[in-house]
Image (cartoon, rainbow, N blue to C red):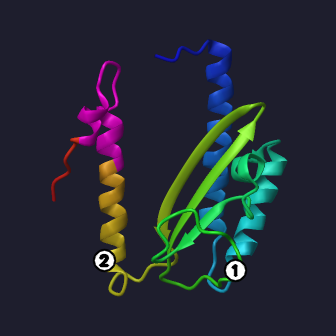
């Protein structure tokens, strides 16, 4: 078991807040006709403003500051010249180092969804969020990993 003291926990929480805020801002900033490189640059600016560094760039020289995957790309997409379109399923991963502490977060969303055209994508996002929530609820002190992995969602 890993034990952290109050100071370490506060540092982890600060790093976690930074990546959460950058992720939320990137989601709000994403627009059709924007390249994934432009969206990544926006995220990089926010990380720098917060005093954080991109963990993928620092750790293994990843070519972007964030990972941006579109539609069929599962994860860890490299930002570039790809142009975002309304209805795209976008996954953004933000990982950062702040004061020596690492934090990571990610989320998927539909860019300007159309309820009729994007119903399947929305069902996918909803199911993933419900699975995440069920896993988080099962992640209690004393629980085993298998307890979390056996969580079921209905509907």
| Mark 1 surroundings: few (<14), some (14-19) or many (≥20) residues within 10 A | some
| Mark 2 surroundings: few (<14), some (14-19) or many (≥20) residues within 10 A | few
Q: In the image, residue 85 lies at what x, y percent?
A: 56, 85
Q: Which residue is mark 2?
A: 120
Q: Residue at x 81, y 58 (%)?
A: 45
Q: How many marks?
A: 2
Label annotation for residue 116: none
Q: Does residue 6 lie above or below 49 as drawn?
A: above
Q: Does residue 136 lie above or below 25 as drawn?
A: above
Secondary structure predominantly adopted by residues drawn in magenta: helix
Q: Nearer the viewer, residue 89 or 72?
A: 72
Q: Residue at x 33, y 67 (%)?
A: 124
Q: In the image, residue 140 lies at what x, y percent?
A: 33, 25
Q: Nearer the viewer, residue 134 or 62?
A: 62
Q: Quadrant of residue 129?
A: bottom left
> Is residue 114 found left or right of 98 in the rendered image?
left
Q: CA distance from mark 2 to mark 1?
A: 24 Å
Label annotation for residue 35: 1
Q: Does residue 20 lie above or below 43 as drawn?
A: above
Q: Is residue 142 magenta?
A: yes
Q: Earlier in the sequence, mark 2 or mark 1?
A: 1
Secondary structure of the residue carrying tag 2 is helix
Q: Quadrant of residue 155?
A: bottom left
Secondary structure of the residue carrying tag 1 is loop
> Is residue 83 found left or right of 99 in the rendered image?
left
| Magenta stretch bounds | 132-149
Q: Nearer the viewer, residue 56 or 92?
A: 56
């Amino acid at each position: 078991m890993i034990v952290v003291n109050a100071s370490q926990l506060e540092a982890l929480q600060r790093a976690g807040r930074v990546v959460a805020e950058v992720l939320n801002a990137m989601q709000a900033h994403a627009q059709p006709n924007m390249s994934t490189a432009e969206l990544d640059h926006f995220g990089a600016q926010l990380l720098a403003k917060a005093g954080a560094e991109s963990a993928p760039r620092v750790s293994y020289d990843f070519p972007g500051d964030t990972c941006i995957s579109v539609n069929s790309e599962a994860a860890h997409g490299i930002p570039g010249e790809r142009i975002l379109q309304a209805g795209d399923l976008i996954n953004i991963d933000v990982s950062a180092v702040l004061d020596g502490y690492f934090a990571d977060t990610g989320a998927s969303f539909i860019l300007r969804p159309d309820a009729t055209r994007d119903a399947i994508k929305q069902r996918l996002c909803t199911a993933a969020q419900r699975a995440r929530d069920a896993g988080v609820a099962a992640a209690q002190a004393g629980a085993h990993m298998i307890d979390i992995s056996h969580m079921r969602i209905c509907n």
